[in-house]
Image: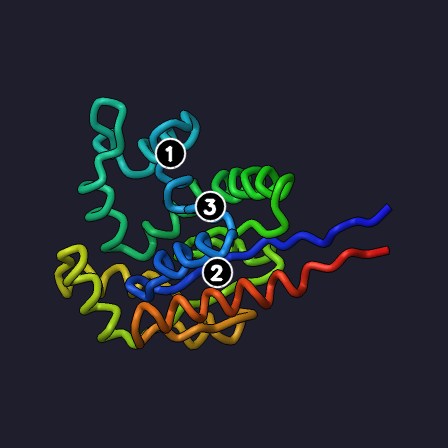
Amino acid sequence: MNKRKKIKLAVTGSIGSGKSLFCEYLKQNGIPVINVDDVSKKLLESDKAIIEKIKKTFGKESFINGKPDKKFLAEKVFSNPENVEKINSIIHPKVIQKVNILADDILKDNDIAAAEAALIYEAKMENNFDFVVLITAPEEVRMKRKMSSEKYSAEQFVKRNENQIPDDEKAQAADFVFENNGSKDDLKNKASLLASILKGLIITNG
């Protein structure tokens, strides 16, 4: 019986790199994408064990009326690398577990499942995937994008950026690296190229 090789793909990139737009283009090429940030947010709002651990670690004020106080957590966590590690150690194991379940579900009806996440390497998730794609752009370009699209201050950008592994380190570990410093059409073409390459790698074993 022929067995088709299926692919789990991770798409990562530093803040403002354009990885979300790249994933939108992958979807247009027929590749389903899991948003790992959305998975994290849902677990943060619904997983009782995670909620209790966060309250214990950062204080009961981490949640208001059963919902995470995003402003409090952002100020408390992202201003302190030690706290970033603490909250990641609480959330990441369950995120990885959930993403694996979602990817396996997608692969029942598809040959490729992609997951978009800023912290693939930081969360040590890379071994869960067959390939990791890194989207890069110069820091000043990324900062300009976040300040324009989401009204980030320069300080907010720098704090988030400092909590991520530098692009040159990630590039050494990634399987594919695409620079996003041109037009949207340029990025769209790169996503189409990747989709073609991956579809070409899906082989039927006799």
Q: Amino acid at mark 1?
A: Lys
Q: Which residue is mark 3?
A: 34
Mark in front: 2 vs 1: 1
Q: Amino acid at mark 3?
A: Ile
Q: Which residue is mark 1?
A: 42
Q: Amino acid at mark 2?
A: Tyr
Left-right relation of 151 to 116: left
Q: Percent from the top left, x then y, of residue 24?
A: 39, 54
Q: Label 2, label 3: how many angstroms apart (C-alpha)?
A: 17 Å
Left-right relation of 150 to 134: left
Left-right relation of 130 to 32: right
- Residue 121's tag is 2
Query: Can I make out residue 194 in this image?
Result: yes
Find out whether the residues at labels 2 and 3 contact each other: C-beta distance under 8 Å.
Answer: no
Mark in front: 3 vs 1: 3
Q: How many marks?
A: 3
Q: Percent from the top left, x then y, of residue 118?
A: 39, 57
Q: Is residue 168 above or below residue 135?
A: below
Q: Is residue 119 above or below residue 42?
A: below
Query: Can I make out residue 122 in this image?
Result: no
